């Protein structure tokens, strides 16, 4: 696919309404799968089984499954209205009370549009048959409510002074909700006057019947039916149930002279579910086993075997996917045309008997036609379908990766902005797409820890004589799909996700092993520093470090501990006790990103810290900014008086180093000397550097 086309698809994927719709449909997955699984188990295509649960001693099983199916799919449109409202509010990153008001407004409008409480209301519209109305009404309502709720001139602020926020927002929602419901009452009146229908759902059915009454040829009727059903599915509507009225009216019979019937459609077109998605299932299992799609395929195996594919449709997703809509429409139409022509030519017998739609592929082909040729036809269609789907699935994977990478970049921008403003980021609690990406990364980080995919790089630190003092250990994570993740994001995710102790245990073991290996290969003096956060001191970090020192047989003074000033360590007795313990054991403590703030001076005054690392912004601007030069000189002078060493990070040019040396700073770290490297490369670098010196 050309770059321009990919960019256009990405623009669609990033559009607000697309994301809101996608969020809503994803939230429907549990309801859909519970109902679909119940239906599949209830309709397992085994004669003895069917007899046992429908009228035999296991009828209670059938009753339970049927109750679950009716309860889930019976309120499908109501649940969809709620899910889409929540999806819209999530992408707006709304708080709980505002989210609830979106739901209430949408349910009120949906009920109004369907005419609940009037003679025109049909309970069937609360199930899958009303999903078009649910999407139509919910999206209009959310947009209108969102717009009106932000207009100050219609709010009743003067009446809500002193009220709690939730109550105030509820009162301010009265006018928008009333206006929206009234608008749908007017719409219903217009629809009845002009078209003699009472809601938008009836318009859909009216248009469908007009279309199918107009078309006479059986082949064309079947082709139109196949296309429309899948087009509705691709747009997010439950096409199978929406077209059920058409199927029962036009395609219910099977016989020697009839080729296209509902059973023909179930057996040869929607194998594995609508879209002939048995092809997607097999491709996922064969070629995407280690990818996200492979996981979804494995979860979908049971239901897809019995021709229920909602997990694939909404999980990949295929629904509302501008790339996969092409094979999703093309494959079943190919299946229809080939099957119709082959049966018309007499190469395969016509469908002689109705087969339960949950009958697995290959069995259904044989049972429906009474011939193995029916199974061979199915297998041939599946192979062709896989060839159609495969290039689109590859493109979809690439576009998905580009999209997620873009979302990760925006997440990093949010984090950097929070860091610059000294604010604590709240990544995981965001309800919009950034929050979802953060939560996805957290799950992947847990998996990466389980699989030991987290690793360390080591950036050398050098003095003014060119002697390598040691290195700083820097955590790295190369995501299997999205490449290297911004290191501070790793730490923030671990902190918010409450897995920081796990991550730090892994880091301390890797750094301790690195110290031992360096010690085994180099006889001179060196140290490796490792970063911790204020949060690190809330768990038993000192025991972990002692365990590592004992296990790897290394001296504590070779492991230096860095803490960032922005962590704002609280001066509690517990913190002081832990810092004191670490120092007594032999660890050297460093303050990272040191400035000249009040907190920095308090840290120096505490006598716990022996080394400070200059804030990177001071070093980057050292040649151009006289104020930064004065600050560095002051830090160095203060450090000399207190017996504290100063390290300058981000030293990238000789001019920067010379200026720092002129100001009295003699320890450096940065790309002028080396980028962060693997341990073996650092050991070689350390030995060569110090041999020269």
Image (cartoon, rainbow, N blue to C red):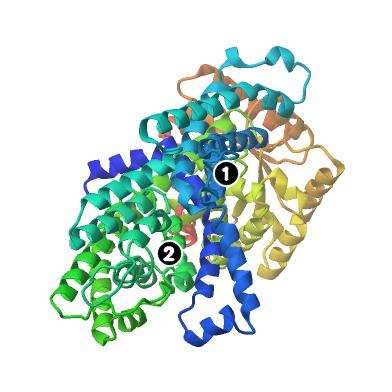
Answer yes or no: is residue 514 visible. Answer: no
Along the horizontal axis of the image, is 263 left or right of 594? left
Q: What is the number of the mark on residue 309?
A: 2
The residue sitting at 20% across, 69% down in the picture is 340
Q: Quadrant of residue 112?
A: top right
Mark 2 and 1 residues: CB-CB less than 8 Å, in contact? no
Q: Residues within 10 Å of mark 1 (few under 14, many from 20)?
A: many
Along the horizontal axis of the image, is 8 left or right of 43? left
Q: Position of residue 574 (x, y in %)?
A: 84, 46
Quickly name the residue at label 1.
82
The residue sitting at 59% across, 15% down in the picture is 154
Q: Position of residue 590 (x, y in %)?
A: 67, 42
Element carrying mark 1: helix
Q: Quadrant of residue 635?
A: top right
Q: Position of residue 280 (x, y in %)?
A: 35, 66
The residue nearer to you, when weighing 516 against 438, is 438
Q: Position of residue 568 (x, y in %)?
A: 72, 35
Which residue is the extreme one toward the left?
345
| Vertical order, 67 against 186 (above or below) | below
Q: Residues within 10 Å of mark 2 (few under 14, many from 20)?
A: many
Say whether disc 2 or disc 1 marks the residue closer to the N-terminus.
1
The residue nearer to you, when weighing 488 against 349, is 349
Answer yes or no: is residue 46 visible. Answer: yes
| Vertical order, 626 against 67 (above or below) | above
The residue sitting at 57% across, 58% down in the picture is 72
| Vertical order, 321 against 173 (above or below) | below
Report how far apart the C-alphas of labels 2 and 1 lie in the structure: 22 Å
The residue nearer to you, when weighing 669 against 572, is 572
Q: What is the number of the mark on residue 364?
A: none
């Amino acid at each position: 696919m050309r770059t321009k086309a990919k960019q256009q698809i990405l623009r669609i994927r990033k559009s607000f309404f697309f994301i809101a719709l996608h969020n809503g449909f994803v939230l429907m997955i549990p309801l859909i799968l519970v109902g679909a699984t119940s239906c599949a188990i209830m309709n397992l295509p085994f004669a003895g089984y069917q007899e046992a649960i429908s009228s035999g001693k296991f009828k209670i099983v059938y009753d339970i499954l049927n109750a679950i199916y009716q309860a889930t799919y019976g309120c499908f449109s109501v649940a969809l209205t709620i899910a889409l409202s929540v999806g819209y509010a999530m992408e707006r990153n709304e708080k709980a009370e505002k989210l609830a008001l979106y739901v209430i407004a949408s349910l009120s409008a949906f009920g109004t549009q369907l005419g609940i409480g009037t003679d025109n209301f049909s309970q069937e519209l609360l199930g899958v048959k009303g999903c078009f109305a649910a999407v139509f009404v919910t999206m209009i309502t959310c947009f209108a409510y969102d717009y009106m709720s932000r207009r100050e001139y219609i709010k009743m602020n003067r009446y809500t002074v002193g009220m709690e926020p939730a109550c105030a927002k509820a009162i301010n929602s009265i006018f928008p909700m009333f206006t929206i419901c009234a608008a749908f009452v007017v719409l219903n009146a217009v629809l009845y006057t002009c078209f003699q229908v009472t809601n938008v759902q009836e318009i859909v059915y009216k248009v469908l019947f007009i279309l199918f009454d107009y078309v006479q040829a059986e082949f064309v009727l079947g082709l139109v039916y196949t296309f429309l059903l899948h087009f509705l599915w691709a747009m997010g509507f439950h096409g199978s149930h929406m077209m059920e009225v058409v199927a029962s009216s036009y395609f219910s019979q099977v016989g020697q002279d009839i080729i296209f019937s509902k059973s023909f459609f179930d057996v040869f077109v929607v194998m594995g579910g609508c879209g002939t998605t048995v092809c997607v299932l097999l491709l996922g299992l064969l070629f995407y086993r280690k990818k996200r799609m492979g996981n979804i395929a494995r979860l979908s195996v049971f239901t897809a075997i019995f021709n229920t594919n909602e997990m694939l449709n909404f999980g990949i997703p295929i629904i509302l996917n501008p790339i996969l809509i092409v094979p999703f429409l093309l494959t079943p139409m190919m299946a229809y045309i080939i099957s119709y022509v082959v049966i018309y030519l007499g190469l395969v017998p016509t469908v002689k008997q109705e087969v339960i739609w949950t009958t697995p592929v290959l069995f259904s082909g044989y049972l429906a036609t009474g011939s193995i040729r029916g199974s061979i036809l199915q297998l041939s269609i599946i192979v062709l379908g896989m060839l159609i789907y495969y290039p689109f699935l590859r493109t979809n994977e690439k576009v998905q990766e580009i999209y997620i990478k873009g979302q990760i970049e925006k997440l990093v921008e949010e984090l950097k902005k929070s860091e610059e403003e000294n604010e604590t980021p709240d990544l995981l609690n965001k309800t919009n797409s950034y929050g979802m990406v953060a939560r996805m990364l957290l799950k992947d980080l847990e998996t990466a820890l389980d699989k030991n995919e987290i690793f360390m790089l080591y950036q050398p630190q050098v003095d003014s004589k060119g002697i390598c003092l040691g290195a700083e250990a820097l955590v790295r994570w190369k995501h299997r799909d999205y490449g290297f993740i911004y290191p501070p994001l790793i730490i923030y995710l671990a902190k918010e996700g409450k897995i920081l102790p796990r991550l730090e245990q892994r880091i301390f073991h890797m750094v301790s092993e690195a110290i031992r290996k360096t010690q085994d290969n180099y006889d001179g003096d060196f140290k490796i520093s490792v970063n911790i956060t204020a949060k690190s001191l809330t768990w038993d970090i000192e025991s972990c470090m002692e365990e590592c020192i004992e296990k790897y047989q290394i001296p504590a003074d070779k492991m230096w501990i860095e803490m960032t000033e922005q962590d704002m360590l609280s001066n509690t007795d517990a913190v002081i006790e832990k810092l004191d313990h670490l120092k007594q054991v032999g660890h050297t403590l460093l303050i990272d990103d040191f400035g000249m703030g009040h907190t920095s001076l308090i840290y120096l005054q505490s006598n716990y810290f022996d080394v400070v690392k200059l804030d990177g912004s001071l070093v980057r601007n050292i040649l151009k900014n006289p104020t930064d030069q004065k600050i560095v000189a002051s830090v160095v002078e203060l450090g000399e008086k207190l017996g504290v060493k100063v390290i300058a990070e981000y030293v990238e040019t000789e001019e920067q180093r010379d200026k720092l040396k002129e100001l009295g700073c003699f320890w450096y770290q940065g790309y002028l000397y080396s980028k962060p490297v693997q341990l073996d490369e650092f050991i070689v670098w350390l030995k060569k550097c110090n041999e020269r010196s």
